Amino acid sequence: MASSKLIDAVRTYSKELVAELEKSGLFTNSSDIGDLREEAVERFLRPLLPSRFGLAKERSSPLMAANPLSLT
């Protein structure tokens, strides 16, 4: 039962994510495109992740680059 709610949520949020990623194509500056896509993916993942998980914004170390999800 809970897994079907999760699947429904992923479907709903994934449609929103696809729409936001398509909007980012309206920009020409690659930094702006990257920022918009990063924010869109974060908005997609945040409601689906347990609160104990954080999302790293910077990849300042090889560990963070390999493991973008971190426990908070």
Image: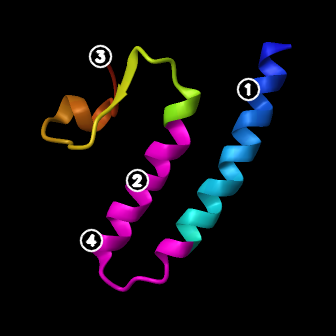
Please give the residue where the numbered disc 4 appears in the rendered image: 31
Image quarter in which the N terminus is found:
top right
Q: Residues within 10 Å of mark 3 (few under 14, many from 20)?
A: few
Tag 4 near tag 2, CB within 8 Å: no
The image shows residue 36 at horizontal and vertical percentages of 40, 63
Tell me the kind of residue under disc 3: Thr
The image shows residue 3 at horizontal and vertical percentages of 78, 19
Task: Please determine whether, in this image, residue 18 is positioned above or below residue 68.
Answer: below
Image quarter of residue 2: top right
Closer mark to the observer between disc 3 and disc 4: 3
Quote the CA–CA distance across marks 3 and 4: 27 Å
Please give the residue where the numbered disc 3 appears in the rendered image: 72
Quote the CA–CA distance across marks 1 and 3: 22 Å
Quote the CA–CA distance across marks 3 and 2: 19 Å
Tell me the kind of residue under disc 1: Leu
Give the side of residue 7 with respect to residue 50, left or right.
Answer: right
Please give the residue where the numbered disc 2 appears in the rendered image: 39
32 magenta-colored: yes
* Label whose residue precedes the other's in the sequence (4 or 2): 4
